[in-house]
Image (cartoon, grey):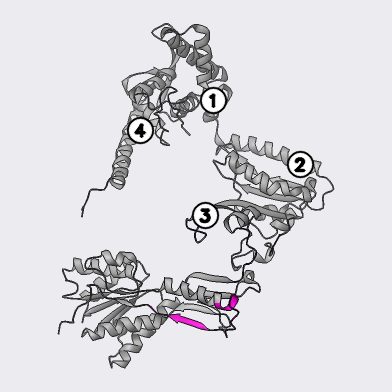
Amino acid sequence: MAKTSTDRDSARGMDLLQGTLDMLVLRTLQWGPQHGHGIGQAIRQQSDGLLKVETGSLYPALHRLEKRGWLKSEWDKSDANQRAKYYRMTAAGKAQLSREQDRWTQLVQAIGRVMNPAPDKK
Amino acid sequence: MRPSDDDLDEEIRAHLELAVRERVEAGEDERSARRSARREFGNLTLTRDTMRSVWRPQWVDGVEALGRDLRFAVRSLLRAKGLAVTVIVTLALGIGANAAIFSVVSGVLLRPLVNRDEDRIVYIRQSGAAANAANLTFSVPEVSDLRSRVKAIGEFGEFSVVEFTMTGLGVEPRTVIAGVVSGPFFDVMGLRPLYGRLLDASDDGPKAAGAAVLTYRFWMTALHGDPSVVGIIYSTIFTRRIALPRALGDFPAVLLNCYTKDRKVNAVVPDETAGASAVTRYLLEHGHRRIAFINGEPWMDASGDRLKGYRHVLAKAGIAFDPAIVRNGDWLPLSGYQWTSDLLTGERPPSAIFCANDLMAIGALEATRELKLRVPEDVSVMGYDDQELARYTHPPLSTLVLPNYEMGRRAAQLLIEITVRGKSVSPMEIKIHGPLVERASVGPAIL
C-alpha cells in the first residue's frame, strides 16, 4: 500500500518495498516523539531523498500503528509554536521494531544470496 | 484511543501548516507555498477516510459495501424488468486491475453486444472495501450459489482473465492474455464464430478437453489470418491414453506422446520398452549382474513400459528378477536419493542402479557420495531422458535420450504426408527410441 514518488527534480527514487513503511516509521521514532510531517521529512533525509513517503500512505500507517498499540499520540506545540500531533513509540513498539529489523536483515541477506551467490560455495 | 473526525481533520490541517511553514522558511512566498503543500498532499478526503477506516472494525466495511452492492443490484434489475434472459458476466480483473485491461474488456467483450439486447444483460461484480478491492474475483462456490438461487436470471456466462506464455508461433515466446469462460458464455453474449466453432456447455467440467477460441485480432496477427488449418498435432505432457478431444472435429490429426484406446488415430509415442532394454543391456555388457531399478510412479505408461524392458532383458540373460531391488520413486531427486541409500546399505547391494529418469539419478549420485562410494568405480549409475543437467553432474551421467525432438519431427512429417501430400495412411503408432549417451557414470562391475 505504501507508495513513494520520486523527488521531482531527481531522476532517482524508488518504490518502497511492501511492508517496510511501518518499520521505517518506528525506526524514525527511535530518536524521540515526532509529528507526521517530521517523520516523512526524516525518512526522506535519511534516505538521501530516495524515499519520499506520500502523506496518503503515511497518516493511515501512523493510525494503524497506534491502533496496534505500538505508538501513542498527543497534541503538542512544535518548536515554532505550531500545534501538531506528536507520535511516540511505546514499549510494544520497541519490541516490534526489533522484530521487524531482524526480519529485514534476514530478508536482505536471503535476497543477497540469491542475487550474488558466492562462487563455488559448497 | 480512537480519534474523532475533528481530530483527523485537525491533524491534516496541522500537517499542511507545517509543510507551508517549511517552504516559507526556505524562501518560497506564502501563496505558492500553500498551493504546493496542498498539491503535495494529494487527495485529502481519501487520506482522511483511510485514516478513519483504520479504527473501524472490519465488518463495518463489509456491511457498507454489501449495502451499496445490494442497492446497485436492485436498481439494475429494476431497469431490466421483464427480462427473460439476464446475463451475468463476472470479470475477475483482480486487485491491480488497470485501465488498460478494462478497455480491452469493454472493447472486446462489451462492444459486440450491439448485436444483442444490451438491456437484458447485467454485469455482476463484487467489491470489498475491507480488502481494499473494487473488483474481487468470484469463487467457484459463489458462482454456483448465484446460479442456483438467482431465479430471475436465465443464464450465466462467467469470464475471467488469465495470462500465459505461448510458444511455437514464430521465433519468440509471447505473453497472451486470455479469457477463461464458462460453457454458456458465448451463447449468453450472442457471439458467433467467423470460422470453426465456439465453446458451449459440453466444454465445461473436469473431463472436457481443452479448447480455445481465438480473437479475430489474434488470428490475423499471430496466425496471419490463415484459415487453412489443415491438420492438428495433439500432444500431451506425459505419455498416456486419451479420449479423442471433440475439439479436433474432423481435422486430420496426429497424436503426439498420446494414443487412443482403439489405436485408430495416428500416434507418435516414445518406445520406452526399447529404451529401458537398451539401458539394461548396456549395464549387462559392463558385467553387471545385480542391477537395481528405481522406477517412476507405477501408474504411468512410461514406468510400466520401462519396467517391461528391464525385465525382458534380464530374463533373456538368464538373470532372475528380484523385486527387492526394484523400487518406485516419484521422478524427483529425493526419491532417487532415498532408494539408493536404502539399496546400497541393505543386504546384497546392487553393483549398478538404473534410474528411470535423470533427476532421480542425480539423487542417486548424491547418496553414493554420502556413503563414500565412488561412481563408477564402486557403483554404476544410469539415468534416463538425457536432460541438459545430465552433462553437468559429477561424474557426468550416462543416460538414454528421450527423443522429444525426433518425436515432434516425425509427427509433423506424418501430418504433412497425410494432409499436404494427400497420402493415405492406415492408422499407425510410431514408436521412437533414442540413442544411449555414454558419459562417465557407468563402469565395469567389480567381481
Q: Amino acid at mark 2?
A: Ser
Numbered disc total = 4
> Residue B49, percent across and down?
57, 26
Instruction: Name the chain letter of the residue that bears numbered label 4.
Output: A
* Tag of residue B164: 3
Chain letter for mark 1? B
Q: Residues within 10 Å of mark 2 (few under 14, many from 20)?
A: some
Mark 4 and mark 1 in contact? Answer it, CB < 8 Å: no
Q: Earlier in the sequence, mark 1 or mark 2?
A: 1
- Give the prevailing secondary structure in the magenta stretch: loop
The kind of residue on which mark 4 rests is: Gln
Q: Where on the picture, by quarter, is residue A8? A: top left
Q: What is the span of residues highlighted in magenta in the rendered image?
A: B417-434
Mark linked to residue B381: none
Asked whether, in this view, residue B242 is left or right of residue B201, the answer is left
Q: Residue at x 18, y 82 (%)?
A: B445
